[in-house]
Amino acid sequence: MMIRKAFLTICSAGVLLSVQAQTPKVYTIQADKIKTPIQKTMYGIFFEDINQAADGGVYAELIKNRSFEFNMPLMGWDEQKKDGGDGRLEVINRATERPENAHFIKAYVTSETGSFGLENEGFRGGTGIKEGETYSFSVMARQNDGNVKLNIELHGDNDAIIGKAELSPTDKEWNRYSVKFSSSATAKKAKVFVWLSGKGVIDLDMISMFPEHTWKNRPGGLRADLVQKLADIKPGFLRFPGGCIVEGRELNTRYQWKKSIGDIDKRTNIINRWNTEFAHRPAPDYYQTFGLGFMEYFMTAEDIGASPLPILNCGMACEFNTSEMVPLDKLDPYLQDALDLIEFANGDASTQWGKLRTDLGHPAPFNLKMIGVGNEQWGPQYIDRWKIFTKAIKAKYPDVKIVSALGPFPKGPEFDLLNKTFRSLGADILDEHYYASPKWFRDNARRYDNYDRKGPKIFAGEYAAQSVQTGSPLNKNNWECALAEAAFMTGLERNADVVNMASYAPLFAHVDGWQWTPDLIWFDNLKSYGTPSYYVQQLFSLNKGTDVVPLTLNNESVAGQEGCFATASLDKNTNELIIKFVNTGATAQPVSFKINGGAYQKKANVITLHSDRGDTENSLENPKTISPVESTMAVNGKLVNTTIEAYTVQVIRLKNK
Ligand code: AHR
């Protein structure tokens, strides 16, 4: 009966008839023998502002260079005149008074009639506007002379006006003015015009526009569709803010969390380090406004039920770039940033930084349990700084776990030195990164089988299969890569006693504004889609269970035999046995799972990710070409007989009676 079913499956897919003759392999699952618990943190999210992930991405601000702080203060803005209007714009620098937001615009409107003003180009050639959405436009303004009014216009396709509003600033001192209005049409690349009418002189700064419907409808918040995609993974942790962005190309442009909290007009903008990193994808207009700052990261982590994992600069700029280092005796401000961050996250209102968090509207602690010291650092210079950081953090916060980098590569002399040293120094968690070919991922499913069970825990902190090679703009988020990642992830899960955390990287990419590919989630100004890798991450996270149990073929774990990879776990919360099976091969596999322990209901739930071709991708137009398909299967006592098609990831959930 089972063989016949396999035959039909294969025939209807038009693939390999030879399967008809294959006898199923018998896999043994010891559901009565717990191997190791799986940590709640097991599958998480890596966030970095690369590929327009923050500004122009998840941070829902629609105006580019709202505070005129780009190196060219009018970048993103265009002076405009219509109907005989006239005037001029001056860029004023008040650095002595406001070093963190030095520039503003002084607009001279010199004609009584017509309009003179500014156009903002938005991100990547326009602003995403949705029909029926309410937009909140705001500006800091100061009337100098006369009575200049602001007329805001949204121009959609064919230059049609699809939304407008008016503001009349009255004060001679700086004040914030805002207005809400709705749009009558959708446009992916709308233009925003700020017309100035009435003769006079007005000062303008922080020209901003947000949709009202952000994530949790927070004013000035995050793009709901993108955060929802993160929430849908139910991630165990959220690593932020990167990545190399933590380090900066030079120390000056490192991420400084204290400058990313509080009033947005006091958060110093800096150039994004990814703007010129790749000659093939220059983005000179890529800046960090820090509108998405540490408070927002912590709150997002809390919203989506993820443990926060901030990674901090350890006194070293990116070693691929300037490699600048802070002298060992000058590390204090960097150390203080780390200690203060822990207090900011966990301290109560009687502490300086806990009070600030409370004042920012979050009296409850963020429950920070781990912190990263450095991103992809390497060499003795890192070890020297790591020791100083570790001593200071552990002295004050012995329970906070420290995540230590093992460099950018998963092997080699840099890796070996750090691995050996940190192990000998009793490090808590080691952060391994692997960007490699799909073959590497398939071949390394046993990577952790022989790791020291008593040593530091492993954080697979950044990984993604590269269809061409790391750094190539031709890399695709295709099914072959996602399948290989799934194969590798069975190895992470089988070794959950050692591997406590894992995250794919990078997370987000704007289809018109990326620097690095592949990425987990792609978006344009209006829409987004999950790649096949996204659905693999989601499948593993939603079906991780609570405890690993042995799944073997001929007494061996399943990690590559005929292209198959598998793991099994119990979910003690739902009383289920969960089998994950990855068939990376071109041949369908008739399988028989013989289960020891448990008594199962006759129907199991099945979730499948599949494509006949390794080069299949999802896209904005076809976002679900590869996405989970749910079905059920009959269970015969403690035997599950089925066929796992070629190029398939399948989860089978068996409910105990
Ligand atoms: O994920 C992109 C980059 O890859 C990260 O910023 C860095 O840590 C790694 O080299």
Image (tube, grey):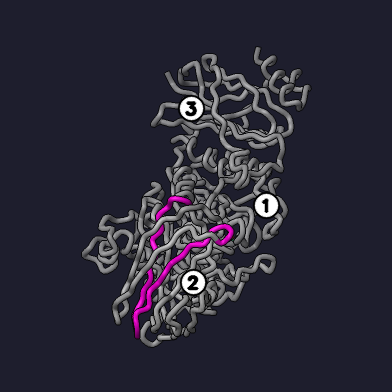
Magenta stretch, residue numbers: 131-159
Residue 509 located left or right of residue 343: right
Residue 121 located left or right of residue 180: right
Does label 2 or label 3 sit earlier along the sequence?
Answer: 2
Mark 1 C-beta closer than 8 Å to ligand 1: no
- Given residues 459 and 653, the one toward you in this image is 653
Residue 332 shows up from this direction = no
Residue at x 54%, y 38% (from the top left corner): 494
* Amino acid on which disc 2 is placed: Asn
* Amino acid on which disc 3 is placed: Leu
Name the quadrant of the C terminus. Answer: top left
| Above or below for 493 versus 435 | above
Expressed as whole percent of the image width and height from the top left, the position of residue 220 reads: 38, 61
The 10 Å Cα crowd at callout 1, few under 14, some 14 to 19, many 20 or more, is many
| Real-space Cα separation, disc 1 to disc 3, in angstroms | 32 Å
- Given residues 120 and 442, the one toward you in this image is 120
Dot label at residue 643: none
Residue at x 56%, y 45% (from the top left corner): 530
* Amino acid on which disc 1 is placed: Gln
Judge depth for marks 1 and 3 and give the one in front. Answer: 1
Q: Is residue 145 magenta?
A: yes
Dot label at residue 466: 1
Q: Secondary structure at mark 1?
A: loop
Q: Secondary structure at mark 2?
A: loop
Residue most toward the bottom? 96
Residue designated by label 2: 65
Residue designated by label 3: 577
